[in-house]
Each structure stands twice: as C-alpha cells, then as structure tokens.
Amino acid sequence: MSDYQTIRYQRQGEVGTLTLARPGKRNAQNPLMWRELATLGTELLPDETLRCLVVAAEGPVFSAGIDLAEGMSGLLASWAGRAGDERSTAEAMDEAMAVAGTFNWIPELGCASVAAVRGHAYGAGLQLALACDFRIFAEGAKAGLPETRFGLLPDMGATVRLPRIVGEARARELILLGEIIDAAEALRIGLANQVVPGHDLEAAAAELAGRLAAQPPLAVRGARRAIDAAWHLGPRESFRLALQAQLRCLESEDFKEARQAMAEGRPPRWQGR
C-alpha cells in the first residue's frame, strides 16, 4: 500500500480498516485527503480477498466535513472564480466531478463496508459514512449536512444516497434545512444501523465486519449490486442482475462447498470462487 499523510489503511485477515488521520483538524477533509482516498480506492477495488472494509477515524471526531481553510478560500473559491467563462467552467466541472466522486469506490467494492461514527459527522464526513453499507454510531454522536449555512449544497453523494437510506421526505429536511441530528434520531430514521456506547464502538464495528466477512463473498457481491441496480436501473434490470449473480453462485465452488459442508454438518469455508 502507498504511504499516506491524512489516512491510514490496515489489514487484519479478511477485514481492512481505513482510518481518517487528521485528528488535530477533527478529520476535516482537504484536497490531499481526497487524493489519498482516491488512491486507496484504486488499490482496493481489484482486491478480491477483501471481505469487509471498516471506515473509522482517529480521535474523538469522525469528520467535521470539508476543511474550511483549504476549501472555502481554496478549491471552492477557485471554482467560483472561473464561473462565467465557458472553458474554465468546463474545467472546473471536471475537477468538481472528480472530488464529488471521491467516495464512489466504496460502494463499488466487491465487499460490504461499515462506518464507525463517533463525535460528529458533518457535511463531507456524513457523505463518507453514507457511501458505506452500514453505519454504527457511538452514543452522543451527531450528524448533519450543514452546507446550506454557506450557501452551498451537499454534492459528494448525499443527494443520491440519503433518500435511499432514510426516505425522501426526511432526506429533504436534512439537506434543505441543514438539520443536525443526534445518534438516537439517526437510529430512529434508519441513518444509523446501531448505536452503542462510545467505548464499544470499535468492538461493535469489528463484530459486524467479522460477520460480514464470514458471509459467502460471491453472494454478497451479487446482492449488493442488485440492490444498487434497483435504484439506478429500475426493478426489471435489478431482477436480471440478481439472477445473473445467482447463476454465478450456482456454478461456483462455494456453492459446492456449501452443499458439502451441510452434508458433513460443519460451517462452509468460502473461497470466493
């Protein structure tokens, strides 16, 4: 793996852990972190041995969002300064699309992912958590999309992912009003899958990651893609993708292993092939 300055990546068995590592800045995201996250994504996407990714953060805060010092007066100001010129606007759009898609590789992984959120997850921090399959909140954690306070809107996946997770009506409140909610409310509306005491957050994330890693990888991969397809391509195409994934499972060594393990009364040993 590459050497990183703003993130860390560690692998333990079949579970990888991505840790945001700017605790002195409340893990605020800057252009360097975005570049490093994108680089990590290119390294992990082809890794078929990875069974689950945990996304966590160093220190008491998951992520305060965009680093305002480097964002408002830096990259965002640069994009704003090029508005009006057609060529410059097109260049700014290309750059913005690259930044906006920083987290897109997480749902494209062949395995599930778990975000472990403590302290708060605001703006881009929450959007990073939304890119994961599951979110576990520590008690007392807060989350929100306060971009409207700056005359902006969340553009790193929240407008696509949040309505799918909590429903359109609640997503509109969180996005248009910039509401901040606590862990209990996040659990109530389905934004959080679990809320645990702060000292149990890492253990809870590791426990869920272990359960996910123990699932048959081909089935997990196919099911995740079919679920996503239902939103992007419609139900019929989702059915088709699910059936294609099912046929792949039926032809796999893992399905043979499942039948053999059942006959022998033991847990199956999944190979992902």
Image (cartoon, rainbow, N blue to C red):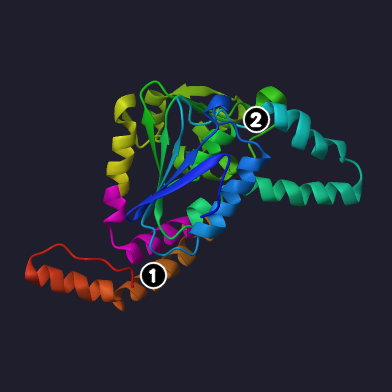
Q: Position of residue 135 (x, y in %)?
A: 40, 38
Looking at the rendering, the stretch of residues picked out in magenta corresponds to 210-229
Mark 2 Cα shell of 10 Å, populated few (<14), some (14-19), many (≥20): some
Q: Which residue is mark 2?
A: 67
Q: Position of residue 15 (x, y in %)?
A: 35, 51
Q: Which mark is residue 245?
A: 1
The amino acid type of the residue labelled 1 equals Ala
* Residue 177 against residue 245 in the figure, above or below: above
Which residue is outermost to the front? Answer: 3
127 or 71: nearer the eye? 71
Do residues under tags 1 and 2 come within 8 Å of each other at their CB atoms? no
The number of numbered badges drawn on the structure is 2
> Residue 102: in sight, yes or no?
no
The quarter in which the C terminus is drawn is bottom left
Residue 217 placement, left or right of 55? left
Element assignment for label 2: loop
Name the residue at 30% across, 76% down: 252
Earlier in the chain: of badge 1 and badge 2, it is 2
The amino acid type of the residue labelled 2 equals Asp
Residue 29 placement, left or right of 211? right
